[in-house]
Amino acid sequence: MSTVVNELLDMTKRELTNLKSGEIFLVRDLIKGYERNRISRSDRLLLSTLFLNYIKSEDSEVIPIEKTSSGQQRYKKGDI
């Protein structure tokens, strides 16, 4: 796995603390626009997969909900 994706995953984990309970978000919402534009498609897909695996195994305050019409996974931050 690339170090870029590892760094992005760490960044998205840190950004979760800025969300309020009940907020719905996409992984892309956790990354600044200009940084997100620099990520290759393959790394974005890998990041999405790793983030989903992370919240399923580690983070009980975030739950996956439905996917968007474009196939992006939506998440909801629950009560801590």
Image (cartoon, rainbow, N blue to C red):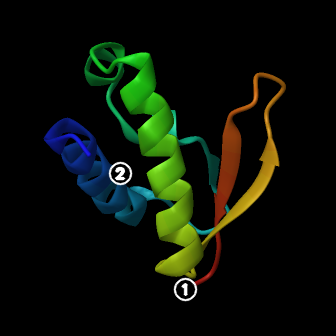
Q: In the shown orientation, is residue 49 left or right of residue 24?
A: left
Which of the image's four quarters has the C terminus?
Answer: bottom right
Identify the residue position indicated by label 1 in the image. Answer: 80
Q: Vertically, is 33 above or below 16?
A: above
Q: Which residue is drawn at 68% across and 34% down?
A: 72
Local SS, label 2: helix
Distance (Cα) linking label 2 and label 1: 18 Å
Residue 47, compared with residue 54, is above or below; it is: above
- Image coords of residue 57 (percent x, y): 52, 78
Label 2 with label 1: CB-CB less than 8 Å: no
Which residue sits at x=32%, y=51%?
Answer: 9
Q: In this view, does 77 lie to the left or right of 44?
A: right
Q: In this view of the protein, can residue 29 be seen by the observer?
A: no
Q: Mark 2 points at which residue?
A: 12
Q: Where is residue 1 drawn, in percent x and y? A: 26, 46
Q: Where is residue 65 in the image (x, y as percent from the top left)?
A: 78, 56
**Mark seen at residue 11:** none
Q: Which residue is drawn at 75% across and 30% down?
A: 71
Under mark 1, the amino acid is: Ile
Position of 40 with respect to 68 (left or right) is left
Query: Looking at the image, can residue 53 be seen?
Result: yes
* In front of the other: 37 or 53: 53
x and y, in percent, of residue 59 in the image: 49, 77
Question: 69 or 15: which is nearer to us?
Answer: 69
Crowding around mark 1 (Cα neighbors within 10 Å: few <14, some 14 to 19, many 20+) is few
Q: Earlier in the sequence, mark 2 or mark 1?
A: 2
Q: Is residue 32 left or right of residue 30?
A: left
Q: Residue furthest bottom?
A: 80
Q: Is mark 1 on a helix, strand or loop?
A: loop
Give the amino acid at mark 2: Thr
Circle 2 packing at 10 Å, graded few (<14), some (14-19), many (20+), is some
